[in-house]
């Protein structure tokens, strides 16, 4: 979870012809499958491949991330005027939230690169891999990593003889270089 403080600001209400002020607000945000689902329901496009393309879409995703109910829309709108807050939120969204890394060769063999990842597809993977739905509240990058790990572990790819020989040749070459030996 990320907490950001949005400062108070004074606004002009043209209809009432008066000034009003928003309160300083601490937003509790979670980049999760739940947030992704809410955003995709409204915009009817995949967030992970296309993402927010307008300020309105970005601000709505931040609203979807909010764990607090009934946030004043002016507080969400205020975020766009604070580049440091936006940067903090963007860094949080990109953070992998895990120490786990997946070998790119293994990952390539187990994912369909042409598949567009949407919230429904993630729910499908969770169901197929017996990942409990409570994980929909996790940071989205951590959940996707768990799905990738489960997929790799459930479907190990055996290396061909050529791949084994290439890997062994590379390992032997690295060891010879490390230990300054010829054989």
Image (cartoon, helix red, strand yellow):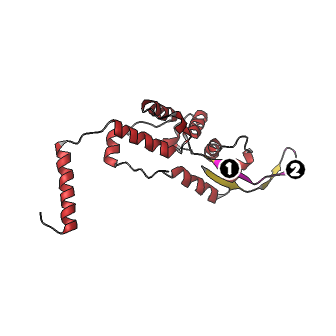
In this figure, which residue is indicated by the disc labeled 1? 27
**x and y, in percent, of residue 27 in the image:** 68, 50
What is the tally of numbered marks visible in this picture?
Answer: 2
Q: Residue at x 50, y 34 (%)?
A: 132
Q: Quadrant of the C terminus?
A: bottom left
Asked if 123 appears above or below 109 in the picture, the reply is above
Q: Earlier in the sequence, mark 1 or mark 2?
A: 2
Residue 160 sits inside the magenta stretch: no
- Horizontal relation, residue 40 to residue 63: left or right: left
**x and y, in percent, of residue 47 in the image:** 53, 40
Instruction: Select label 1 or label 2 by which is in front.
Output: 1
Give the label on residue 18, or none. 2
Residue sitting at the far bottom: 180
Q: Quadrant of residue 116?
A: top left
Give the label on residue 128, or none. none
Residue 63 seen by the camera: yes
Between 75 and 92, which is closer to the camera in this rendering? 92
Q: Residue at x 20, y 62 (%)?
A: 175
Residue 80 seen by the camera: no
Asked if 88 appears above or below 30 in the picture, the reply is below
Predominant secondary structure, magenta span = strand
- Horizontal relation, residue 127 to residue 21: left or right: left
Q: Which segment did they paint magenta?
A: 15-28
**x and y, in percent, of residue 109 in the image:** 31, 41
Residue sitting at the far right: 17
**x and y, in percent, of residue 95 in the image:** 51, 52
| Classed neighbour count for the residue bearing mark 1: other residues with Cα under 10 Å, few (<14), some (14–19), many (≥20) | many
Residue 22 sits inside the magenta stretch: yes
Q: Residue at x 35, y 44 (%)?
A: 107
């Amino acid at each position: 979870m990320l907490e950001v403080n949005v400062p108070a600001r004074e606004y002009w209400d043209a209809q009432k012809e008066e000034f009003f002020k928003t309160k300083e607000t601490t937003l509790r945000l979670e980049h999760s499958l739940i947030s992704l689902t809410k955003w995709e329901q409204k915009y009817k496009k995949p967030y992970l491949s296309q993402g927010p393309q307008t300020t309105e879409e970005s601000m709505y995703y931040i609203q979807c991330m909010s764990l607090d109910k009934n946030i004043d829309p002016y507080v969400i709108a205020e975020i766009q005027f604070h580049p440091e807050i936006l940067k903090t939120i963007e860094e949080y969204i990109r953070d992998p939230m895990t120490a786990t890394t997946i070998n790119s060769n293994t990952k390539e063999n187990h994912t369909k690169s042409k598949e567009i990842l949407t919230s429904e597809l993630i729910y499908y993977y969770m169901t197929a891999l017996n990942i409990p739905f409570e994980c929909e509240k996790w940071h989205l990058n951590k959940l996707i990593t768990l799905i990738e790990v489960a997929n790799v572990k459930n479907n190990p790819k055996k290396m061909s003889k050529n791949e084994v020989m290439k890997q062994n040749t590379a390992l032997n070459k690295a060891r010879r270089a490390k230990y300054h030996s010829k054989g």
